[in-house]
Amino acid sequence: MRSASSAPPSDGYPASAETGGEAARRYHARHGSVLPAIDPAAGTTAPLHHPGVPVLPLPFPPTFPSPSDGGDPAAATAERLGSLLALLNGVTRIDWTGSGARVGRPVPSGGGAYPGEVYAATGSGLFHYLPSAHALELLSGADVRTDVTGALDRPPPERPECVLLLTSRLDANLARYGPFGHRLQALDTGVLTGQALTLLESAEATPMAHARFADEELGRLLGLNSRAEQVRSVVTGRAPGPIVPGAAMLRRRTARSGFEPVPILVDSLLAVLQEAVRPMAFDHAAPVGCDVYVVAQRVAGLDAGCHRLDRNTGRLTPVPGGGGTPRGLFPPGGPGELAGFESACAVLVTGDYEAGYPLYGDRWYRMLNLRAGVIGQRIGVAAARAGLGAGLRCDVDTAAADAVLRTRPHRTTLLAALLGRERGGGAPVCHLLPTVPTLFRPRTQ
């Protein structure tokens, strides 16, 4: 594992000073919308750990439903936190691929780099989560929740019982993707944020995701080197009740085996989209929300071509003159083109950078991608619920996609999700957590 004192990246992005959106514009024009020459042989940095601090193992596998407070409240709270973290960013399965076995997480990550780290602030102290060991590193025995909420632009009315701080290791994937990796990190943070919101909502903790805060203050509380790791999102909530994950969340995984070239039903697609665009619990109002489009290829009950989701009616409306195929959204000869050719449709999430820069400055760039990542997380879980395979892709050809969607000025494609029936039974997988709802029982003594 990489220690917390590793050397910072040399790229110098993101800029530390606020420039009113100018730095973000320059970055996106140079790196954020242009696919890099990816180096598949380049590795990613090892997961983060903090040498010399106490390590507290968590029970694995977690208990479902997580314990109530009927017994030892402190023990129940600790085990509930362990269940939450395992389902947020832990190791939940083993996937077999052509090159061997790899651990599977409950959320996807661009290139499997997993630049995100999870910190938890509780009444017992400040912790860093180690996914591979399913353990907590105790960084401080102090209760810093009041300090954390004091750094938020819009703190909760009462001190939250649950505080999750999501960071990004800035050099995590730059060796493979170059500066384009910063955009992937913003989307990854959104996916993690969406997972945290889904879990805490199911545990009736009334969560709120925060994207506006004093970066340096939170970095100081966590002891971060700001040139190597930065806080990207904070999720607050009440004390979570017993956690009972939905089977769809446990079965969600990337469709690595590709897709069967067969139609899917339009009703199944609409169910996925309805889940994806439901309201988000954020600390800020988006000047313009993310729009969702579908480029249909094999959807029974829906004409081939480009359609825009009408949030008011929940219907898909054809885009005038909008044709295209999922295959044509990706660079020719690459894995995205093949996956698009096999898929039933592509779901594209778009947003408007220029609408938010006057309000939020450079920060809007990551705030908008944060929202797109939340939508991507919801698409994956809803697809699993509908019995569909899904794959989030960031290798979409942005210019080609924007041309197909005929987006209005300043709107651009942020994320693509391919949907369809996964080929065969999918890649072999061993679930480390039960995926059948009837198996979720309290642990007996």
Image (tube, rainbow, N blue to C red):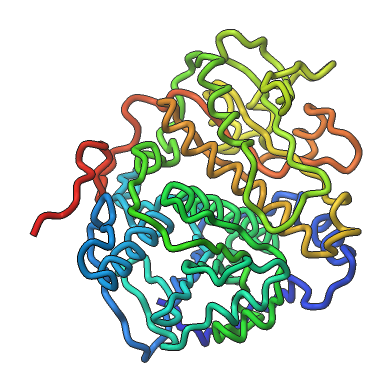
Nearest the viewer among 64 and 226 is 64
Whether 272 is drawn above or below 233: the answer is above
x and y percentages locating residue 399 in the rendered image: 80, 38
At 65% across and 78% down in the image, what residue appears?
150
Q: Is residue 438 left or right of residue 280?
A: left
Whether 123 is drawn above or below 317: the answer is below
Question: Residue 173 sits in which quadrant?
Answer: bottom right
Q: Is residue 10 left or right of residue 261?
A: right
Outermost residue toward the left in this view: 445
At 78% across and 74% down in the image, what residue appears?
15
Any part of residue 349 in sight? yes
Outermost residue toward the bottom in this view: 52
x and y percentages locating residue 288 in the rendered image: 82, 44
Question: Residue 88 sits in which quadrant?
Answer: bottom left
Nearest the viewer among 43 and 281 is 281
At 33% across and 59% down in the image, what residue appears?
83
Q: Is residue 237 left or right of residue 60?
A: right
Q: Is residue 416 left or right of residue 386?
A: right
The N terminus, quarter of image: bottom left
Any part of residue 338 in sight? no
x and y percentages locating residue 390 in the rendered image: 49, 34
Whether 353 is drawn above or below 42: the answer is above
Nearest the viewer among 30 and 117 is 117
The C terminus, quarter of image: bottom left
x and y percentages locating residue 193 in the rendered image: 56, 56
Question: Residue 12 sits in which quadrant?
Answer: bottom right
At 83% across and 48% down in the image, what residue appears?
287
